[in-house]
Amino acid sequence: MGYTVFWEGKVPEEPHIHSVGFAIRSQLVQQHNFAPTAINERLMTDRIPLTQDKHLTPISVYAPSDEEKAAFYNQLNHTTQAVPANDKRGVVGDFNARVSKDHRQWEGIIGHHGIGSCNANGQLLLGLCAEHEFIVANTLFRLPKRQKTTWKYSQSKHWHILVYVLTKARNQKDIRITRSMLGTDDCWTDHRLLISRLNIKTQRPPRRAPGSILRRRFEYVRLHNPQMVRSYKEAYERHLVNPVNQASVEDHWTTLRDAMTRAAEETISFARKKHQDWFDEDDETVSLLIEAKRQTRLHLKNQLIKSSDQRDLRSFYAATKEIFGPTRSSVGGLKDVDEATIITDSEGILLRCRTHFENLLNDQANTPSDLLRITPQDPVHHWMSLLDSIQDFNRALKRMKPNKAPGPDNIPLELLTHGGPELKNRLMLLILKIWEMTPPPSDFRDANIITIFRKGDRENCNNYHGILLLSITSKIFAHFLLDRLFILARDVLPESQCGFRPFRGTIDIIFCARQLQEL
């Protein structure tokens, strides 16, 4: 995970002897649009949103050790006073100061585990802490001395604390640990990094983009109950208004879709998410339930093996979800077009996927402009323009496979098959309107794209396979066209074409090719 560095230093003409800054995780910067404020080359502040309408205001400092320290502490005092009173605040940085271990004299400011003695800069620092009710977090934890000190004096080789973490006394419980990071002694440096872990949580971005539509699946399994089917038909007829006189196909389809949706919401409702049960292993009252759960898992395991042997994929995956639970895979980031920049925010990932599939599905074909003119034309078949009947609609409806994910209209096949003759007649009337050269509804032309990871790098869009979820009603209309094209294909396609044709296969062609090779 990358970090974004914000820093402020002297102008290029002056010596680069000191600066101040923040290193914030790039994902947090993109989610909350962080923009730290640099007061000068020694002070920088930021405001981080937390949960429950709270904020954290960290102040990064690099204090001077010469005659400029009076002006520095004066500026730091004004900066601390400007922080809202309800914010959690903290001051972090190199103060070039040494506070003592006299916790009795500085009660409530220095903890019981300080080291060394106090110098002049330490007096200024402790005065600032007393004025703003700060506590020195470095002195709160009982640690070895080498895990407290941050700087080694080159002449005496003694280690001291110069980097401090200051926080309000009321927020002391938020600090889990403050200690030096060991392992840098071999880098030939006289400084150690200081780490302070806080028990706080930043505000999470919304899981759904603003303005997005929440699509929930209907519990269409309840339609296996005849009583529920009758209730659904009655609710559908109650919500349905007569769409025959509607001028446009879009209004006709919207009326049918809304009636089916409201009827399904009243009768079968939406499917609920199932969470795994939690048991306390030390509680004797639930021991029988735990044993029953184990027996259920054993039964599901046997069912899983049986479904695998019978090649029943639906039962196989249903049993898998019951045993292991649904798996949720999230994309940590996607590479941009240049394959160098990593996109981590949700809106950027959606935009990158949209651009990828637009380029993939809208590829420009390099066909000559006079292709239709030079292609031999078959005679016009007038029988292809004849309208279908309700019997053709019922046959196409029976050929549809159940338990399929719906498209943009969120209407599953079960709502169509259990809607009764009135719904089927009105859907047939809608298809006849579309057949008479009328543009289809927008739900028939749109589709939801679901990405499935294949293999390779998860940050590469080319390693994801896009699945289009189309409207179920539009698939019924597509079956009408497919039936006519199959009849026409018998006369147009050559005898050698066996792929994607009923009662034929490429195995026969391969067998013939091998027989010819053996001759």
Image: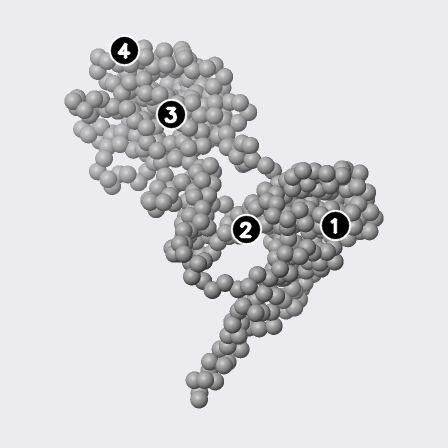
Q: Quadrant of the C terminus?
A: bottom left
Secondary structure type for disc 3: loop
Q: Position of residue 109 (x, y in %)?
A: 41, 17
The nearer-to-camera label among 3 and 1 is 1
Task: Give the mark nearest the N terminus, 3 or 1.
Answer: 3
| Residue named by callout 2 | 468
Secondary structure type for disc 1: helix
Q: Position of residue 337 (x, y in %)?
A: 36, 45
The nearer-to-camera label among 2 and 4 is 2
Residue 403 falls in which quadrant of the image?
bottom right
Crowd around label 2: few <14 · some 14–19 · many ≥20 (10 Å): few
Identify the amino acid type marked 2. Leu
> Is disc 1 in contact with disc 4, using a CB cutoff of under 8 Å?
no
Task: Give the mark nearest the N terminus, 2 or 4.
Answer: 4
| Residue named by callout 4 | 70
Q: Nearer the viewer, residue 374 or 231?
A: 374
164 lies above or below 314: above
Task: Give the mark nearest the N terminus, 2 or 3.
Answer: 3
| Residue named by callout 3 | 35
Q: Position of residue 338 (x, y in %)?
A: 33, 45
Residue 198 falls in which quadrant of the image?
top left
Q: Residue at x 22, y 12 (%)?
A: 67
Q: Quadrant of the N terminus?
A: top left
Crowd around label 1: few <14 · some 14–19 · many ≥20 (10 Å): some
| Residue named by callout 1 | 424
